[in-house]
Image (cartoon, rainbow, N blue to C red):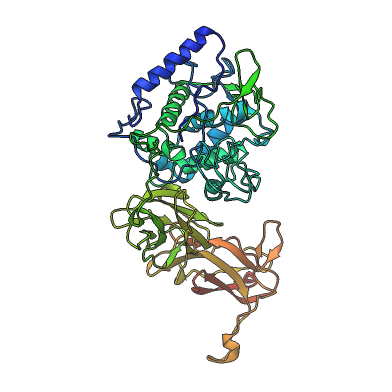
Amino acid sequence: MAAQFGRRLRKGATTTAVAAVAVAALSASGAPGTPLVGDSGDQQSAGTTPPPDSGAATGNSPYYTDLPPLNTPNKPGTTTNLPATGSAESGIPASILAAYKKAEQTVADSDAACRLPWQLLAAIGKVESGQARGGRVDANGTTFSPILGPVLDGRGFAMIKDTDNGAYDGDATHDRAVGPMQFIPSTWATWGQDGNGDGRKDPNNIYDAAFAAGRYLCAGSRDLSLAADLDRAVLSYNHSDAYLRTVRSWFDYYKRGTHEIPDGTGTNPPGLGGGTDPGPSSPNTTPSPSGSTKPRPKPTPEPSKPGGGTTSPKPTPTPTPSQTLAGVENAGTGTLTATAGTAFAERIKVRAENSLGGPLAKVSVTFTVSGDTDAAFNGGKKAVTLFTGADGTVTAPVLKAGEKAGRFTVRAAATGRSLPAVTYGATVTARQADAIARTDDKALTAAPGAEFADAAEVKATYKGAVAAGVAVTATMITDTDAAPGTEAEAAEPAENDKGPYFKDAHGKTVRTLTDLKTDADGILKLPKIYADDTTGTYKLRLTTEGGATVVIELTIEAPEAPAA
């Protein structure tokens, strides 16, 4: 849909002339189909303006054609933490700016490869709703009244029949673009997000809408640092070259610098509105230089073609089945099991499929570790985004187990797509030992009521190698001299209630310790052992995680009487 120009009132002949020069400059530098470059860091896009990837988010609704001032808001390169100074037109209301920056960070956490800049969200928010009518939002970021585009009934605009039963736009017959980022309901149903964490997806909330817009712009494998991908993303939002040029001009302006202004103090352009808008005009009127309003002129019919036909917008290309992502599936990943502190031998691998069941390349896939675990990918990352290769597959980085034993999950999902994820269960087992033995054979004795002078020391191994960090339980047990092979021999020995004992942190007598671990060399040196007044030979059993055991004898005996 062609843009509707001339909606903003500029005061004074000089300002009007400046605006005209700016429009002319944009027209001259970017005629329909001419690639635009935001800055010297962009790569030049080639050929004509790229077609949109899918139906436009706004339904190609009309938008504001205000252009940025010719003077820069601040010196080049300053884009954040600027003082609250300057005109309301060049500033961005505080809540709106915060929502854009939060969306940039949230998208980066799950799809860093997209490189979404918040200035692009600001540019789109400017031309779609004048930054939510100049920042007229409440403390949660929700507009005081709905921002609604015109009824898309085919009369001067696109024909889009109702898709939400009026839930978002209040119209049960046709759709209307909704909210500060002007999503049509059918697009919001797919891309809507909860950006402010209140459990709702509200297109009238700037945090929700900005996050949804960011995800939408990052669809597929777009890298928005590339001019061609950025142009394609903007055109998917509203398929108009004039729209692309306007968004690009604001994008470039905001990248050179801007500043924060209080909510509600920004420029409130006339036009899209709906509801009870505190702005100067109603949705059906256009301001005149005297401040009064007059009916908005009806849309101009499309120009006639030679031979009596009419010129119609080119239809949006529909992706072929071989280009359409149907989903991602497991590509043969086996069982995910690892011992604490080691790497998983199995690598997670997924395959992206098109609608024909064939492989699809260049699909962005995000792998996310979730659950109560300290496992992570190489580098300690909990989430990694990668692209599928020519065979449609992509393999996640090596997954490393932490020290916490238990189960957790890894999800693999097409980034920014409302498609089912592939979920993998993973298990971390505790470090184990299959053997444990004393490091010496020194007799361990003590007099009644005294301490054992020598500390017992053991070493744990697993398959002949040092078993570091293995949990060990130490228990003073009763004697088990039952006949071999009998039920009594198989029974678990009971804890002894007399003889040698340990002390806990509070100095209390205990005969079982469970918080022991071998050191880096597999060595465990037992804490002090004390003797009560009951003489005799006793047994201390040490059991490792993995089931290895060793029994150590402890003797309490009275010292020999001195010779006469």
| Location of residue 485 with respect to 70 vertically, above or below | below
| Location of residue 89 with respect to 428 vertically, above or below | above
Residue 38: x and y in percent read 38, 27
Residue 562: x and y in percent read 63, 69
* Nearer to the camera, 398 or 360: 360
* Nearer to the camera, 493 or 396: 396
Please tell me which residue is depicted at 42% across the width and 68% down the height of the picture: 335
Q: How many marks?
A: 0
Please tell me which residue is depicted at 34% across the width and 38% down the height of the picture: 50
On screen, residue 239 versus residue 474, left or right, reads left
Residue 190: x and y in percent read 52, 50
| Location of residue 493 with respect to 131 vertically, above or below | below
Q: Which of the 4 image quadrants contains residue 557?
A: bottom right
**Residue 453 seen in render:** no
**Residue 240 seen in render:** yes
Please tell me which residue is depicted at 57% across the width and 44% down the height of the picture: 175
* Nearer to the camera, 400 or 94: 94
In this view, the residue farthest toward the front is: 307
On screen, residue 32 versus residue 73, left or right, reads left
Query: Which quadrant would the C terminus be assigned to in this image?
Result: bottom right
Residue 10: x and y in percent read 55, 14
Q: Which of the 4 image quadrants contains residue 349?
A: bottom left
